[in-house]
Image (cartoon, helix red, strand yellow):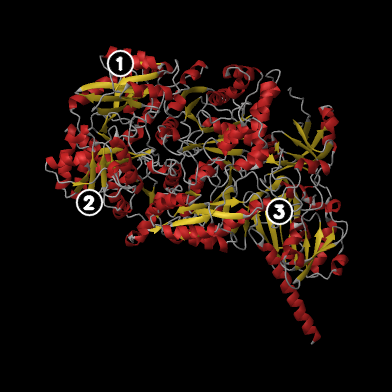
């Protein structure tokens, strides 16, 4: 069945900001979709509010709307663009829910738009748990026994039948939001109560516990000719009870007989047909009882998912790409397998390697959060590794996490019983606890009893343990010992620690003995057919498949697993660099271990090495590339801290580092040397010093005066950064900051209160500066730049300030010796410009600046790294010839970046949300962009995209710290003028009323007479009578009160503003929303607008 | 603790390549044709599939033995592979049905295997060079000079021209009853199934559809077939070169001449092809795996099939032609491989006779093509109804 010819234009819906449960994988799938649609000659319209995505690159789609993904906004886009069809299955639950709403509201029908790749009835069958149970039965499967409830009373009645523990799952939420396991009535009231609120249909499913069963997932594809294939089977090492996104998973399934596997396959095929999945991908999750093989279907997703991205990377079968072709009407037998070229996509991949995925968590960012893993997903990223066996893949995956304590360790003196007791509770440490308990003497049976991890996996841990002992006790580190260690994934560092040697010494011995990895190919077919795609992974095996190459390769090191502070923005820069270099004729090699990303799509670079980003693994890749045709050099400045911290060691190993040199990188990080650069340039930094002990730190703090900003050096995302007001707090900080060493001292800076923070991204070629963009933060300094909203071009900075920023940037870039990108943070306090820090690398804001100004900074930086000058770039039209991002004309559009925070995901052990206060430590998982003619509407869009639109009427709760009381009067007055009612507590209310602003007074929570907070704002919040909260924190008692209020508002989805600066911006936005009709503008139109403005300015 | 010198095993390929690993299963020497299979599950079914007789099977999936061995999943009474090549053999199986380890099972059946070799390198060599003669040497034999081992490998007979069905077939006839496979009521038909290396799944699927199956030894003649009064005849899969199966070809022609419905699988497809007058030929490295896409001409749909064949029928794709043996009328290639357009099924248009090259009975593999058993059951039922009707007519 060939392609449909009636689809001339298709609207693709993206997934919006990166949040837990919906991350970079949808940029990967969406980007593939857009490329396919373009190749097929279809006009592509895209909506996605996330500027850090490749899919929103204006050269990909024909019309790219960086607008909020809400049914109302998408309806406006449909009205304007009149696409023939909407493709909603590649943008996660966000896209699917939006499509369902558009269908329900009659928008699709009104504009004659067809839904492709999905049908609403199938989605509802798949997602409505009660109906899905029927589907499973008709498909010859079984479901866990369950009850649907809509009230707490119904829930209590259902538990009478099901018995505790019960699984609680709210309907229509993503990433398992709001779900959990209830062991008793207290749990049930808490989890189910919240679940009823999260579910858009106030519907929750209670289900018999299948805790401890083995968990599997099958990734499926179906075409319109009813051909169905299984792309990949995935087995969770963690038994049922942990969300699959938080589980360590393995592909293919390891512990199923063919009979059992075919049963899962048969049920899956029957389900996909019974549900009526239109075309494309879907996945089905199963639980298998290890005692008797009973199979229970857990759920299905009728769309491309996180698991599909993993399955695509694990098999080489490009699910999203093929799903898009299927949506256009092709059948699978008409689509060639990209990798083999000669065989069709209508087959089932077979693997001759093992893939292990491990989640990466960010609990260190939320110390109050309960780290227990449950059916609510909490991980913020993942790493994948490929090996020729499980142990090799597992150990590679664990070291890919780049997290202390994530790797297997070998301590005989540990207490096995205590470790197993800890391992009973699923946490991020369970695997290592179990392995270490086995090492310390626990039996396999004991480990199984405690964890229910399949004995086959436990035996693999024991195998690793035995090899650790062989390494430790071998008379000498000979070839046989090394080969065996390497065959099971031991790193040089692990071997070194077992033999009390330096990793570099182990490497030297290993190289001398010729024990080197080979590189195998991911080919979908276990070598049955020749593969034409150089998608490689290392293994200590016999034959390498690296082919000779003629041009020297340019190696780009990716950013590893996504984490808070180092996310998709860095992958964006890596991908852009690769694309620019390829286009300019260089041969590119990507090294990365993150399966969610575009960079690990096998056709982005000339060659992809799916490898951990440790020095050892990177050096081996470079050696393989060197041996097969030479290496021109390596880029370390694009992928964030992960590759950056390898810079010096790579150079020491003789690898040419392209772009800014390791010396320059170090200079910017090194306090003393950087201070000299500033001195030479006549610039000042806030007073500061470095310290390696409390005494040191106290001396510095006394000298420069409190409050001080303290942090470890070499971190990203403000990890461990705090504002410290007292000596006592400083002592506490030093005690708890473990990573301070003489080689990595802590930094102590004078904290500038009430300063305006300014962020700059710029290019420098050694002689000339291109100011990419100047961003003015909405919140005052002290909030991490990643969590702060910012606006480009600045809206309250005068031309003289901008000129000072430009001059300072140029001097710093020159002083540091930048060749490529530099990001500098300034603070403007009392009209003095302070330099906070400079990072000579691609920053988190590069994609935002690039999207806002239409200039591709990362691409330019990569070419500068290869020796191009800004003049060359101008000559090629890659940067504008007569202006830059620091001097945008008045008519240019205004772009606002807003952070998206994951507070609703994290609960304390008592089940309450963690505090939503912003601070110097970054906590956001993603970002959105609002772009429009003026700041007010752009800001309104950013808010709508980040968490839902601001209210335009209703009641606002206002409670501010003393320092904000002056500011709040004017703001509150304006609110009242706009018709809002104000609710407030004691002090704030008094100030407002004295100033003639009417405010209803409620008692403080601390003064409330009952636990539910009757008479307080909590009661009003729960009653739905508060539409917006302004609460700025201060010390002491108000802080607890504030926490209660923010926690309640956060869990109820009421917008919470914690700074007056942001609140002022919100007021502007609210006014704009009441004044103007919401209009949608594509990035391509914004570019035209900018060009017009430039022309006008010139004239 | 010092690392003991591990015991070695050697895999020697005809082209002179030597892979050193560790022994798996029995120690000793084994010779055979090296082939690879890409199945990720179902090693027990693979090992007990008689079609693998005289072949050294290389498993591309690295972890083998994870689910142990049980008494339900064997496809025949023995392990037939000549040798077994794996990368990572399980130390401890884990499955609720597991009764013993695969290592023990291989040793008990005297199957010489090798583990800890680069199975992907071997597979790539077989893909490029084609299936090769090979040998595995372990125990004392592993210490023999490589040149001597290579000579021994090269001196074995080639698979082309090998007649093997008779070596794997059942010694005596037996009956598989529908009642033992969940069928309630009277059998709907009787089939004579020639065991050329039959897998247990085949009679099981037939019996589950109400068909009583008389499994007959490979050398059964037409008289022996007639003796069970069949409504149709089935020829199974099996090892060896179809060009050596002249006797079965002759028997099948008698079956067709008698107008009996026919269904064949794998070897049974090749014999059908030869009976119709087509040739057969050896594929460079064969099709062996559970993921092989086949186009079913009748439905226009793709079926993912389990395959295990080194030979194929040489018949024209795409059009209906007169069978070279013209008395059988029109014939079409009913199924073909989407990977390489090899013939995967034949069907006579004028008689109830068809066969497929792949394995609809799966075990191991997907169940996409189970409908073929229904097709055969229907042909048998029609035949029986027709016979009954003609009997009634004759009686009247």
Find disc 2 in the rendering and name its residue. Answer: A954
Q: Please tell me whether mark 3 or mark 2 is closer to you in this view.
A: 2
Find disc 3 in the rendering and name its residue. Answer: B363
Distance between the alpha carbons at the discs numbered 3 and 1: 77 Å
Q: Mark 2 lies on which chain?
A: A
Task: Choose between B192 and A894: the one closer to the eye.
Answer: A894
Distance between the alpha carbons at the discs numbered 1 and 2: 48 Å
Cβ atoms under marks 1 and 2 closer than 8 Å:
no
- Describe residue A608's horizontal placement relative to residue A786 as left or right: right
Considering the image in quadrants, where does the C terminus of chain A appear?
A: top left
- Describe residue A1064's horizontal placement relative to residue B295 as left or right: left
Count of numbered circles on the image:
3
- Quadrant in the picture for residue A467: top right
Q: Which mark is residue A670?
A: none
- Quadrant in the picture for residue A35: top left
Q: Residue A702 carries which label?
A: 1
Work out whether disc 1 and disc 2 sit on a shared chain: yes
Task: Choose between A1007 and B231: the one closer to the eye.
Answer: A1007
**SS at circle 3:** loop
Q: Mark 3 lies on which chain?
A: B
Distance between the alpha carbons at the discs numbered 3 and 2: 66 Å
């Amino acid at each position: 069945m060939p392609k449909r010819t009636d689809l001339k234009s298709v609207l693709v819906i993206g997934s919006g900001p990166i949040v837990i449960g919906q991350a970079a994988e949808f940029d990967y799938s969406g980007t593939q979709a857009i490329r396919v649609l373009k190749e097929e000659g279809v006009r592509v319209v895209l909506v996605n509010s996330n500027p850090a995505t490749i899919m929103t690159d204006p050269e990909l789609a024909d019309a790219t709307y960086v607008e909020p993904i809400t049914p109302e906004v998408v309806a406006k886009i449909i009205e304007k663009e009149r696409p023939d069809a909407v493709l909603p299955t590649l943008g996660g639950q966000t896209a699917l829910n939006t499509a369902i709403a558009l269908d329900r509201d009659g928008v699709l029908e009104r504009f004659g738009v067809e839904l492709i790749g999905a049908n609403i009835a199938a989605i509802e069958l798949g997602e409505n748990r009660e109906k899905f149970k029927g589907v499973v039965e008709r498909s010859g499967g079984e479901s866990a026994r369950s009850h649907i409830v809509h009230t707490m009373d119904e829930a209590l009645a259902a538990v009478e039948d099901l018995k505790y523990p019960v699984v609680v799952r709210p309907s229509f939420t993503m990433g398992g939001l709001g779900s959990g396991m209830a062991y008793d009535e207290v749990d049930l009231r808490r989890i189910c109560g919240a679940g009823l609120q999260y579910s858009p249909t106030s519907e929750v499913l209670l289900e018999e516990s299948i805790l401890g069963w083995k968990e599997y997932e099958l990734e499926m594809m179906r075409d319109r000719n009813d051909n169905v294939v299984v792309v990949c089977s995935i087995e969770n090492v963690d038994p049922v009870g942990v969300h699959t996104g938080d589980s360590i998973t393995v592909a293919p399934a390891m512990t199923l007989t063919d009979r059992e596997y075919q049963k899962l396959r048969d049920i899956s095929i029957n389900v996909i047909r019974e549900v009526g999945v239109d075309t494309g991908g879907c996945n089905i999750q199963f639980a298998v009882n290890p005692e008797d093989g009973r199979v229970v279907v857990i759920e299905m997703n009728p769309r491309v998912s996180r698991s599909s991205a993993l399955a695509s990377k694990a098999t080489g079968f490009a699910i999203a790409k093929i799903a898009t072709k299927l949506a256009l009407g092709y059948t699978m037998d008409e689509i060639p397998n990209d990798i083999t070229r000669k065989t069709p996509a209508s087959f089932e991949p077979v693997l001759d390697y093992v893939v292990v995925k491990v989640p990466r968590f960010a609990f260190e960012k939320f110390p109050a959060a309960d780290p227990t893993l449950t059916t609510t997903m909490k991980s913020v990223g993942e790493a994948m590794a490929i090996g020729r066996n499980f142990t090799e893949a597992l150990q590679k995956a664990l070291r890919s996490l780049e997290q202390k304590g994530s790797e297997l360790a070998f301590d005989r003196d540990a207490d096995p019983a205590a470790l197993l007791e800890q391992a009973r509770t699923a946490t991020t440490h369970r695997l290592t606890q179990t392995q270490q308990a086995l090492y310390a003497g626990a039996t396999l049976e004991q480990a199984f009893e405690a964890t229910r991890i399949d004995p086959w996996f436990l035996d693999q841990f024991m195998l690793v343990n035995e090899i650790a002992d062989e390494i430790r006790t071998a008379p000498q580190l000979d070839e046989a010992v090394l080969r065996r260690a390497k065959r099971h994934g031991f790193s040089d560092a692990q071997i070194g620690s077992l033999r009390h040697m330096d990793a570099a010494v182990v490497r030297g011995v290993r190289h001398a003995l010729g024990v080197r990895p080979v590189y195998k190919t991911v080919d979908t077919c276990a070598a049955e057919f020749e593969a034409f795609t150089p998608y490689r992974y290392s293994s200590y095996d016999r034959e390498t498949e690296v082919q000779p190459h003629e041009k020297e390769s340019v190696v780009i090191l990716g950013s590893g697993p996504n984490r808070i502070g180092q996310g998709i923005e860095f992958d964006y820069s890596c991908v852009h660099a690769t694309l620019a270099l390829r286009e300019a004729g260089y041969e590119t090699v990507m090294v990365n271990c993150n399966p969610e990303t575009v960079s690990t799509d096998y056709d982005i670079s000339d060659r992809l090495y799916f490898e951990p980003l440790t020095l050892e693994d990177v050096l081996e890749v470079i050696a393989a590339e060197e041996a097969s045709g030479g290496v021109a050099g390596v880029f370390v400045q694009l992928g964030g801290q992960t590759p950056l911290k390898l810079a010096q060691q790579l150079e020491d190993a003789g690898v040419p580092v392209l772009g800014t040199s390791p010396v320059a990188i170090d200079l910017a990080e090194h306090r003393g040397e950087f201070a000299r650069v500033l001195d030479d340039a006549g610039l000042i930094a806030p007073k500061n010093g470095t310290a390696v002990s409390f005494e040191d730190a106290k001396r510095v703090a006394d000298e420069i005066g409190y409050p001080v900003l303290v942090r470890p050096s070499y971190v990203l995302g403000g990890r461990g950064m705090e504002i410290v007001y007292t000596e006592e707090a400083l002592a506490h900080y030093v005690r708890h900051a473990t990573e301070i060493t003489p080689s990595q001292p802590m930094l102590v800076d004078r904290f500038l209160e009430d300063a305006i923070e300014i962020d700059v991204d710029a290019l420098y070629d050694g002689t000339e500066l291109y100011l990419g963009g100047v961003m003015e933060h909405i919140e005052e300094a002290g909030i991490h730049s990643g969590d702060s909203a910012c606006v480009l071009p600045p809206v309250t900075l005068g031309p003289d300030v901008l000129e000072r920023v430009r001059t300072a940037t140029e001097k710093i870039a020159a002083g540091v010796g930048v060749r490529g990108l530099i990001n500098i943070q300034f603070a403007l306090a009392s009209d003095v410009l302070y330099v906070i820090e400079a990072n000579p690398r691609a920053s988190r804001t590069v994609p935002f600046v690039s999207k806002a100004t239409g200039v591709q900074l990362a691409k330019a930086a990569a070419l500068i790294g290869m020796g191009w000058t800004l003049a060359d770039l101008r000559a090629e039209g890659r940067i504008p010839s007569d202006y830059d991002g620091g001097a945008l004309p008045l008519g240019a559009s205004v772009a606002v970046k807003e952070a998206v925070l994951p507070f609703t995901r994290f609960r304390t052990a008592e089940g309450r949300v963690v505090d939503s206060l912003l601070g110097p430590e970054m906590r956001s998982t993603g970002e959105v962009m609002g772009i429009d003619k003026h700041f007010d509407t752009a800001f309104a869009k950013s808010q709508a995209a980040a968490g839902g639109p601001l209210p335009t009427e209703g009641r606002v709760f206002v409670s501010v710290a003393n320092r904000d009381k002056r500011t709040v009067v004017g703001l509150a007055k304006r609110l009242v003028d706009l018709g809002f009612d104000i609710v407030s507590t004691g002090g704030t209310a008094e100030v407002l009323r004295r100033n003639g602003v009417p405010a209803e007074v409620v008692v403080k929570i601390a003064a409330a007479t009952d636990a539910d907070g009757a008479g307080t704002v909590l009661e009003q919040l729960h009653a739905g009578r508060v539409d917006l909260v302004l609460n700025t924190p201060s010390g002491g008692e108000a802080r607890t009160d504030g926490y209660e209020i923010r926690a309640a508002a956060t869990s109820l989805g009421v917008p919470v503003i914690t700074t007056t600066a942001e609140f002022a911006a919100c007021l502007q936005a609210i006014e704009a929303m009441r004044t103007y009709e919401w209009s949608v503008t594509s990035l391509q139109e914004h570019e035209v607008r900018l060009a017009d403005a430039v022309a006008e300015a010139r004239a | 603790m010092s690392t003991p010198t591990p015991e070695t095993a050697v895999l020697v390929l005809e082209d002179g390549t030597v892979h050193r690993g560790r022994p798996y299963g029995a120690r000793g020497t084994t010779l055979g044709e090296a082939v690879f299979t890409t199945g990720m599950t179902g090693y027990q079914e693979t090992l007990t599939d008689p079609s693998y007789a005289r072949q050294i099977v290389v498993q591309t999936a690295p972890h083998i033995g994870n689910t142990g061995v049980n008494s339900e999943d064997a496809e025949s009474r023995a392990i037939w592979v000549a040798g077994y090549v794996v990368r990572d053999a399980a130390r401890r199986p884990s499955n609720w049905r597991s009764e013993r380890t695969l290592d023990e099972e291989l040793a008990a059946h005297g199957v010489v295997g090798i583990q800890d070799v680069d199975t992907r390198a071997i597979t790539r060599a077989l893909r490029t060079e084609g299936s090769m003669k090979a040998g595995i040497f372990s125990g004392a034999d592993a210490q023999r000079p490589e040149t001597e081992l290579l000579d021994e490998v090269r001196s074995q007979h080639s698979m082309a021209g090998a007649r093997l069905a008779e070596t794997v077939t059942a010694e005596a006839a037996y009956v598989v009853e529908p009642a033992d496979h969940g069928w309630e009521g009277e059998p709907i038909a009787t089939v004579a199934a020639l065991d050329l290396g039959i897998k247990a799944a085949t009679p099981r699927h037939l019996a589950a559809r109400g068909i009583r199956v008389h499994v007959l030894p490979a050398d059964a003649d037409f008289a022996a077939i007639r003796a069970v009064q069949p409504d149709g005849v089935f020829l199974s899969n099996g090892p060896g070169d179809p060009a050596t199966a002249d006797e079965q070809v002759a028997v099948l022609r008698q079956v067709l001449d008698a107008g009996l419905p026919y269904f064949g699988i794998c070897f049974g497809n090749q014999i059908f092809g030869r009976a119709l007058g087509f040739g057969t030929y050896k594929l460079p490295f064969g099709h062996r795996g559970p993921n092989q896409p086949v186009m079913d001409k009748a439905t226009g749909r793709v079926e993912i099939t389990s395959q295990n064949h080194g030979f194929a029928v040489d018949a024209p794709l795409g059009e209906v032609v007169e069978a070279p043996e013209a008395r059988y009328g029109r014939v079409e290639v009913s199924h073909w491989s989407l990977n390489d357009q090899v013939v995967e099924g034949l069907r006579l248009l004028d008689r109830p006779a068809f066969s497929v090259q792949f394995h609809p009975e799966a075990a191991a593999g997907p169940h996409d093509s189970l409908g073929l058993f229904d097709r055969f059951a229907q042909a048998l039922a029609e035949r029986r109804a027709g016979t009954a009707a003609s009997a009634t007519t004759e009686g009247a």
